[in-house]
Amino acid sequence: MASHRLPEASPQGAAGAWGHRLGPRSILARYLADLAFLLLAFSLARWLRITLPLGKALDAEGAALHPPMVFLALVIWSVSLAAVRAYHPTHHRDAIAEMQAIAAAVTVAALVYAGLLYLSYRGLSRLLFGYLYLLDLGLTAGAHLLWRTIARRWGAGKRRMAVVGVTPAAREVAAGIRRAGADRVTLLGYVVEGNADGQPTELELPVLGELAEIAALVERHGIDELVIPAARPTAEMEDVLATLQPLSVSLTVVPQTADLILSRAQAEPLGDLVLITLNAPAIGPLDRVLKRMLDLVAAVLGLLFLAPLLGLIAILVWLDSGRPVFYLSTRLGEGERPFRMIKFRTMLPDADQQEGDLVQIDAQGQVDFVKSPDDPRITAVGRFLRRWSLDELPQLLNVLRGEMSLVGPRPELPELAAHYAPWQRRRFGVPQGMTGWWQVSGRSDRPKALHVEDDLHYIRNYSLMLDIGILWRTVGTVLRGRGAY
């Protein structure tokens, strides 16, 4: 079926394939660049320590950078970067994960280096060492972020995928990849297991060829990753793996039980077996403690510093449309526990009586809460508060009481949750938040059904650094005001 086939092209003609072939060289170049930045950090740290009028006066030993000392640093940094797998492809797919790896590598290397210096060159200035750590961390992280920007602009670094089969399950997997991974994945098409000329004609993607000729297809189209949408017999999987072994192509299996995963899976080797835990907690005990500490500190400081602003807003709401100043709404928190969420009232006092009319269910069963930027129930002051998200500030009280978190899925209305499909209830597996992934990805401009997908993305990829990143992006989202109504 020629109409389904892509034009033959050399891998060098495709940015993704070119990037795949030069992967080892690219990794080596970035590793050498990181060591070069370490040497630069040494020089800048020494210059800053001598130039800035901070600390005690230096003797000759305090600012001396002996060659063995620098060589030792290069060895320690190399081991540390390798230990955290700083150049692993999984880190390159996620900026936050990559920054976490870089921060961990530089911090651990600095601590080990400090201990060894204590046993050898104890005369080195501690302030110089502090400059070294901060400069190297900044230079290395900045270089990796710059590389990500350049790679994204050139189209390099994207995983070039092909899906095995054209069954409904395979096409569903392909649709999911196209929907969720457009910025990280180039989906080339399908690799069929039978005759490529006898496949359906209404496919969304081209048929690249047959599985039997996978080696030639990898060479022709620069495939990085072959995706199999369901588990296959062991013998068949071994045959595919044996064929791919010399090609440096990843084989990814999408299990049939994926829809049953409630948060994120955990794999654990046990002898010759691999055990996959499907209902693993999304937030571990330590992460939960750290998240709660961040919530408490931010809520207390926010309420203290924002008290004058909160008082002024309360007066404006009262002058504009009377009482009550606050609006209390029953929402569902973590574990679907109901609580009263507090906001500044932005609508007329009886507006909530019409709230049920805004809940709609489409033909596919998707639940939506219809919001409009020109809703006549919104007051003049309320429109301003919504534009800058100031009506949400009283929810710091909910955060302080432990009913909400700073970051998490948005607390849902019970009327909407009553229509949820089982997979949508996964969003209640973590604390609900004042801001979240969907707020920084389009806010009210995005369909409600996509909000849940964004929430599940947050749950599957949770980390404290992700929370901090979302809080930072929320500032820009609020300032732009897109989707806030």
Image (tube, rainbow, N blue to C red):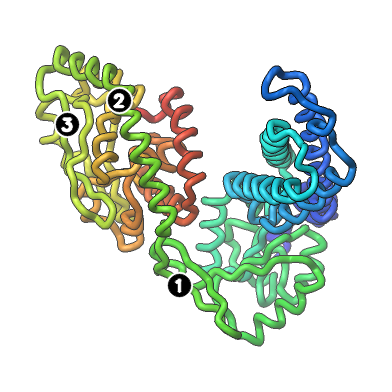
Q: Position of residue 204 (x, y in %)?
A: 58, 56
Could you say where residue 77 lies in the image, as x and y percent from the top left? Answer: 76, 49
In this rendering, the answer to whether 335 lies above or below 244 is above
Indicate which label's residue lies in the foreground, 2 or 1: 2
Q: Amino acid at mark 2?
A: Leu
What residue is pinned by disc 2? 304
Q: Is residue 315 visible?
A: yes
Give the residue furthest to the right: 67
Q: Look at the numbered discs 1 and 3 and tell me whether their residues touch, using CB distance below 8 Å.
A: no
Whichever of callouts 2 and 3 sits on the residue coming sooner in the sequence is 2
- What is the quadrant of the C terminus in the image? top left
Mark 1 burial class by Cα count in 10 Å: few <14, some 14-19, many 20+: few
Graded by Cα atoms within 10 Å as few (under 14), some (14 to 19) or many (20 or more), the crowding at tag 2 reads few
Amino acid type for the residue under numbered disc 3: Tyr
Rendered position, 191 above or below 233: above
Q: Which residue is mark 1?
A: 277
Give the left or right position of residue 97, taking residue 159 as reference.
Answer: left
Q: Residues within 10 Å of mark 3 (few under 14, many from 20)?
A: some
Residue positioned 15% across, 12% down in the render: 319
Taking the view exactly as shown, the residue that stands out farthest to the top is 319
- Residue type at mark 1? Thr
Q: Which mark is residue 327?
A: 3
Along the polypeptide, which appears first: circle 2 or circle 1?
1
> Position of 363 compared to 157: left or right?
left
Question: For the residues carrying marks 2 and 3, which lies nearer the camera in this image?
Answer: 2
